[in-house]
């Protein structure tokens, strides 16, 4: 299988039903993508595939031959979302953060001026056990 990961062509040898998230972490050593629930509920494993945010624990690698994948390591320098989280002290343990950054970047691409309600609705698929979300919502507004 051939993937373009963060702009670089990579060859992957995993069986086709292996989840993209496992390939990113275990074969390509891109451990910024977090696998938490492994069932598509928490949003920690989100990555971009052809500019859409997808849960990498649910996507079999066999569907992705030749596709563009972007992980949190691909946001260099820091994306505006990452910088705003940093400036607003919106990260605690950090487990949810890569998925949040991918998710919110997708939101801001579609809707550059979301309301607080829009942000909270969009984040319903991203679980954070630490922050209570308030600082995250403020960071997005920023
Ligand atoms: S690890 Fe993929 S949604 Fe939770
Ligand atoms: S900062 Fe710890 S889970 Fe969100």
Image: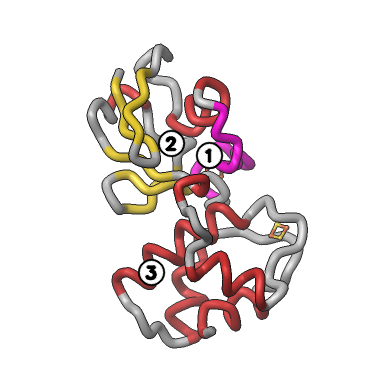
Q: Is residue 51 left or right of residue 75?
A: left
Please count the marks in the image.
3
> Quadrant location of residue 105?
bottom left
Q: Is residue 43 magenta?
A: no
Q: Which residue is mark 3?
A: 107
**Counting residues from the N terminus, which is met first, the one under dot 3 or under dot 1?**
1
Colour mapping: secondary structure
**Counting residues from the N terminus, which is met first, the one under dot 1 or under dot 2?**
1
Q: Is residue 37 magenta?
A: yes
Q: Crowding at label 3, few (<14), some or many (≥20) Cα neighbours within 10 Å?
A: many
The reply to whether the residue tagged 2 has its Cβ within 8 angstroms of ligand 1 is yes
Distance (Cα) linking label 3 and label 1: 22 Å
x then y, percent, for residue 54? 39, 47
Q: Crowding at label 2, few (<14), some or many (≥20) Cα neighbours within 10 Å?
A: some
The reply to whether the residue tagged 1 has its Cβ within 8 angstroms of ligand 1 is yes
Q: Which residue is mark 1?
A: 39
x then y, percent, for residue 88? 67, 78
Range of the magenta residues? Answer: 29-41
SS class, disc 1: loop
- Frontmost of labels 3 and 2 is 3
Whether label 1 touches label 2, CB < 8 Å: yes
Q: Quadrant of the N terminus?
A: top left
Q: Residue furthest front?
A: 77
């Amino acid at each position: 299988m051939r993937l373009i990961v963060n702009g670089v062509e990579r060859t992957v040898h995993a069986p086709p039903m292996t989840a993209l998230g496992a390939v990113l972490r275990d074969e390509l050593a891109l451990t910024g993508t977090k696998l938490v629930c492994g069932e598509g509920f928490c949003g920690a494993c989100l990555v971009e595939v052809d500019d859409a945010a997808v849960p990498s624990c649910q996507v079999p690698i066999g569907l992705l031959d030749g596709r563009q994948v972007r992980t949190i390591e691909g946001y260099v320098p820091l994306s505006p979302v990452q910088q705003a989280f940093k400036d607003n002290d919106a990260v605690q343990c950090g487990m949810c953060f890569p998925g949040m950054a991918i998710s919110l970047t997708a939101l801001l691409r579609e809707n550059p001026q979301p309301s607080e309600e829009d942000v909270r609705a969009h984040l319903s698929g991203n679980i954070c056990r630490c922050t209570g979300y308030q600082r995250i919502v403020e960071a997005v507004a920023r």
